[in-house]
């Protein structure tokens, strides 16, 4: 695959994947996700690769989430295949479940904004190392992006149920220090020291047994899957595509047009079989 949206390099046992759309704060479109899948599969099949590092180009953002202006409601790659990942609630999440499935540890190297689907990608990595100017948060309920399922629920394993619900329901944004305190990330360093710090972590990982680390990663993931089944609630309880709904279209438009959302377009709650009192 010819890469347009990412830069993919291998050096000394480390695969470096950089989302290269700085003009839109590295926002994710369908092609971004497809290219990252391709690179992650290549790295995962390469026995010489011991660590994978994901980052964003430029000083402003690791990633601003799904590109709301590009390819909604049903983003597809060049040959028409859907690239939404059902285990991540139907969002276009770069790497999707591949981040969890490849044998190597994956490090998110975050500098700047880390929002929405990009944030899901980062917290599903094995480690997140951030600059002190980084900002973290979710946006799905505000902009009509259909986030649910494992990609959402896994956050509670990192920061606890109360904090995870706050992050998702309120769509607040948090500093790198706040993210460190809540257990969302592993380390915070000055921006000019970020890559050097990530390289130190890579060297520590490379000194240890790759097969044992792989088995440990599988164990962590299997435990997480017992707590958070991968099937999305959108698949179980909602008929049709949320992304094509009147609510989702209105929220995307309001976001792009910088105006308040017309709340009359909201969908009614889904019937989950509550029954009578």
Image (spheres, grey):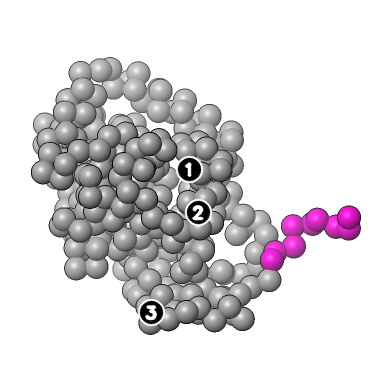
Residue at the right extreme of this rendering = 277
Which-is-in-front pick, marks 1 and 3?
3
Reply yes or no: does residue 78 show up in magenta.
no
Give the image quarter of residue 230.
top right
**What crowding class fits label 3: few (fewer than 14 Cα within 10 Å), some (14-19), or many (20 or more)?**
few
Give the camera-side residue of 171 and 208.
Answer: 171
Q: Image point 47% across, 32% down: which residue? A: 221
Residue that label 3 marks? 258
Instruction: Give the answer, above or below, for where 115 lies relative to 223.
Output: below
Label 2 sits on residue: 168
Give the quadrant of residue 265.
bottom right
Q: Earlier in the sequence, mark 2 or mark 3?
A: 2
Q: Quadrant of the N terminus?
A: bottom left
Examine the structure image and report whether residue 275 is included in the region drawn in magenta. yes
Which residue lies under the disc numbered 1?
155
Residue, x 74% and y 57% (percent of image)? 272
Q: Position of residue 180 (x, y in %)?
A: 34, 38
Task: Pick the quarter of the image with the C terminus.
Answer: bottom right
């Amino acid at each position: 695959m010819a890469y347009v949206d990412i830069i993919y390099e291998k050096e000394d046992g480390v695969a470096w994947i950089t989302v290269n759309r700085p003009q839109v704060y590295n926002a994710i479109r369908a092609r971004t996700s497809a290219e990252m899948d391709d690179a992650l599969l290549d790295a995962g099949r390469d026995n010489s690769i011991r660590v994978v590092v994901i980052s964003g180009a430029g000083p402003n953002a690791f990633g601003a989430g799904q590109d709301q202006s590009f390819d909604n409601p049903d983003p597809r790659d060049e040959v028409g295949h859907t690239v939404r990942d059902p285990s991540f609630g139907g969002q276009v999440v770069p790497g999707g479940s591949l981040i969890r499935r490849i044998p190597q540890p994956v490090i998110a190297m975050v500098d700047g904004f880390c929002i929405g689907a990009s944030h899901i990608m980062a917290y599903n990595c094995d480690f997140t190392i951030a600059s002190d100017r980084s900002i973290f948060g979710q946006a799905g309920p505000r902009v009509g992006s259909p986030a649910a399922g494992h990609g959402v629920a896994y956050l509670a394993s990192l920061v606890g149920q109360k904090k995870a619900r706050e992050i998702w329901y309120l769509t607040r944004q948090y500093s790198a220090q706040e993210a460190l305190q809540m257990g969302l990330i592993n380390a915070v360093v000055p921006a000019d020291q970020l890559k050097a710090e990530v390289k130190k972590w890579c060297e520590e990982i490379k000194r240890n047994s790759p097969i044992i680390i792989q088995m440990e990663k599988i164990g962590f993931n299997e435990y997480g899957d017992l707590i958070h089944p991968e099937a999305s609630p959108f698949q179980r309880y909602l008929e049709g595509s949320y992304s094509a709904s009147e609510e989702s279209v209105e929220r995307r438009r309001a976001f792009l047009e910088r105006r308040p959302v017309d709340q009359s377009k909201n969908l009614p709650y889904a019937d989950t079989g509550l029954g009578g009192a």
